[in-house]
Image: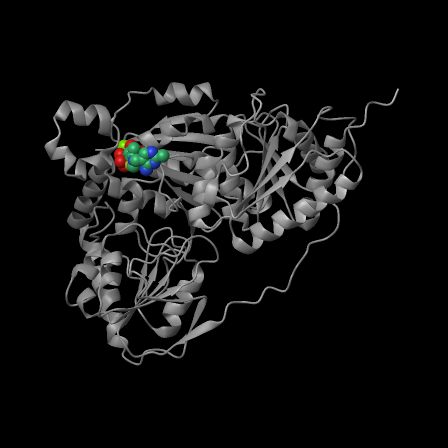
């Protein structure tokens, strides 16, 4: 006997099939009844080789996994959730995606119109839930006839086009009536990519002349480095800019911006990406005597602390190199000297022509340094040294990313950080998504460096999916007994110590070995710098948690 046909299954299959035709490669699915047709269509398309499905129980984890996938692949990624609170669980990742400019397709299953606003189970007002954080809401009524297949297809095209062009999340709210799914069908991708000729933004010519710095904030990308080199300008690149490398790099930019001999002499700033890690950059851009050129983000918000005084352009092109080489040279040299002076690594100081005594002393110093407690600086340095272009480095919010930003030298590696809203949520899930988005045959290790509270916030993301590929993940936790970032705030001195501890620093004595074991992760407690280097350079296969007590 043929099983009952389900308009829900047919429409869901057509929607996802068309999305696959347009270029959708990853769908993150969370379980639910109302969304079953979408979830089953996604796995049918996976069987046909059209896309990959990643299943996550917790939609908040699913949302951040999709975010990581979209950051890594640069293309929209879909999430499938059921109705009600499941939709709201996506909100943190949607907000981050909105502010950072990352395209997501939120396929939110819903009740049909007759069941809305009548107190039906698991039904709320889903369109509009994300307010301005989505570029568009495509509200698709429950399918009933074969004409609705065309409606589903058009919804797919519209959502894909909007998300791709705006680099923003788009909600496709999909009502379904019972039967919520029907007989399994074989599905394939429908149609081809739709590639409206996208015109590159006009590039504004930038003449050499005024004393210029190039600032690369989060997600600035390699074009910031190329532009700084072409103009021969100092490159003040944050650690997650994607531009922290090259001959013009000024890693110690904060100290130099504070210095009247450097920051005080700047006449023009060209800003790429979203700088979030220093007070000095916004302060520089606020200065009336500094001409500011903001280079448009491909999506996301403009970073503009100038109150509209800055000029905004889609792209820039250097009209030649600054003939005054001393400007950039002085920044680069001063930066290198500053970074060397604050170095606490055990490896420096090798005598030029070591005699036997010097060699012995050097070896002794090296040995005792390897046994020394691990400082934040030593931790970020070790992680940075161990990370290579085929790896990914994901940095959690809080102190370690700031430490890395202040200290690490230039290296052309991919660093991901959720700086759109700088939340401590979703860090492990974002990293997992990034790893899943890397080409399988060329994927290295995804290393996550985060604080102890940031890990505990996303403990649910440690939950693996049996039978699905997971990337090689090395989660490195700098454990300093709660939110140490609050120690640097005024409240640390004004609040009663016990109150400060209870509501701000919030230390949690969690047994991380047991946490790791519960989720089947390898756990290592790192006691020395020697251990740290060994664990980082030869990462365990699969998923591992390195617990690093900070000294
Ligand atoms: C979702 C979210 N909640 C709260 C905060 C505020 N916050 C910023 S840092 C921080 C503490 C982080 O502690 P930890 O991960 O241990 O890092 P540490 O400060 O010790 O480096 C908190 C709660 C936030 N950024 N995001
Ligand atoms: Mg901490």
Of residues 174 and 182, the one drawn nearer to the viewer in this rendering = 174
Q: Quadrant of ligand 2?
A: top left
**Residue 349 coordinates in the image, percent (x, y):** 20, 52
Of residues 146 and 64, the one drawn nearer to the viewer in this rendering = 146
Q: Give above or below for 528 relative to 77.
A: above
Q: Which of the image's four quarters has the N terminus?
A: top right
Indicate left or right for 219 with 21 as reference: left
Indicate left or right for 139 with 320 as reference: right
Asked whether residue 434 is in view, the answer is: no
**Residue 23 coordinates in the image, percent (x, y):** 65, 49
Of residues 360 and 528, the one drawn nearer to the viewer in this rendering = 528
Residue at 34 percent across and 19 percent down: it is 511
Of residues 486 and 181, the one drawn nearer to the viewer in this rendering = 181
Q: Give the quadrant of residue 140.
A: top right
Indicate left or right for 253 with 53 as reference: left
Q: Which of the image's four quarters has the C terminus?
A: top left
Residue at 76 percent across and 32 percent down: it is 7
Q: Give the quadrant of residue 236.
A: bottom left
Residue at 19 percent across and 46 percent down: it is 362
Asked whether residue 8 is in view, the answer is: yes
Q: Give above or below for 120 relative to 426.
A: above
For the view shown, which residue lies furthest in the bottom direction? 323
Total marks placed:
0
Indicate left or right for 81 with 11 as reference: left
């Amino acid at each position: 006997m043929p099983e009952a046909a389900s308009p829900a299954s047919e429409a869901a299959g057509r929607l996802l099939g068309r999305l696959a035709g347009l270029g959708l490669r990853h769908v993150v699915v969370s379980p639910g009844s109302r969304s079953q047709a979408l979830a089953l269509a996604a796995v049918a398309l996976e069987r046909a080789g059209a896309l990959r499905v990643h299943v996550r129980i917790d939609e908040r984890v699913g949302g951040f996994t999709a975010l990581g996938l979209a950051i890594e692949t640069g293309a929209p990624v879909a999430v499938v959730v059921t109705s009600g609170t499941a939709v709201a669980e996506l909100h943190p990742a949607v907000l981050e995606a909105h502010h950072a400019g990352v395209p997501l397709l939120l396929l939110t299953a819903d009740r049909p119109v007759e069941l809305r606003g009548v107190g039906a189970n698991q039904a709320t007002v889903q369109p509009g839930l994300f307010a301005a954080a989505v570029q568009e809401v495509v509200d698709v009524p429950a399918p009933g006839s074969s004409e609705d297949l065309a409606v589903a297809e058009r919804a797919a095209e519209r959502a894909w086009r909007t998300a791709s062009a705006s680099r923003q999340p788009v909600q496709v709210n999909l009502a379904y009536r019972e039967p919520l799914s029907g007989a399994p069908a074989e599905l394939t991708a429908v149609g081809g990519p739709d590639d409206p000729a996208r015109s590159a933004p006009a590039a504004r010519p930038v003449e050499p002349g005024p004393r210029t710095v190039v600032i690369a904030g989060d997600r600035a990308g390699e074009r910031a480095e190329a532009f700084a080199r072409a103009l021969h300008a100092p490159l003040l690149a944050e650690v997650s800019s994607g531009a922290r490398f090259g001959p013009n790099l000024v890693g110690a930019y904060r100290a130099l911006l504070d210095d009247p001999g450097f920051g005080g002499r700047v006449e023009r700033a060209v800003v790429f990406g979203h700088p979030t890690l220093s007070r000095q950059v916004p302060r520089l851009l606020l200065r009336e005597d500094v001409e500011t050129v903001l280079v448009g983000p491909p999506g996301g918000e403009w970073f503009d602390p100038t109150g509209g005084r800055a000029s905004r352009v889609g792209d820039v092109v250097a009209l030649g190199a600054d003939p005054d080489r001393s400007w950039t040279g002085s920044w680069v040299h001063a930066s290198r000297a500053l970074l060397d002076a604050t170095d606490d690594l055990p490896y420096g100081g090798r005598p030029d022509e070591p005699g036997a005594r010097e060699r012995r002393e050097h070896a002794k110093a090296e040995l005792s340094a390897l046994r020394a407690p691990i400082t934040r600086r030593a931790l970020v340095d070790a992680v940075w040294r161990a990370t290579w272009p085929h790896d990914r480095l994901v940095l959690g919010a809080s102190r370690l990313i700031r430490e890395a930003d202040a200290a690490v030298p230039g290296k052309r590696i991919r660093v991901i950080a959720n700086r759109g809203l700088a939340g401590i949520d979703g860090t492990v899930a974002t990293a997992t998504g990034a790893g899943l988005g890397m080409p399988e045959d060329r994927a290295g290790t995804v290393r996550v460096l985060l604080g102890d509270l940031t890990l505990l916030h996303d403990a649910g993301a440690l939950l693996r999916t049996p039978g699905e590929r997971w990337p090689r993940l090395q989660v490195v936790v700098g454990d300093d007994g709660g939110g140490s970032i609050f120690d640097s705030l005024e409240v640390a001195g004004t609040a009663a110590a016990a109150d400060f501890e209870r509501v701000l620093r919030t230390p949690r004595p969690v047994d991380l070995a047991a946490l790791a074991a519960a989720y089947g992760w390898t756990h290592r407690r790192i006691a020395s710098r020697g251990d740290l280097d060994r664990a980082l350079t030869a990462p365990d296969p699969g998923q591992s948690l390195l617990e690093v007590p900070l000294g």
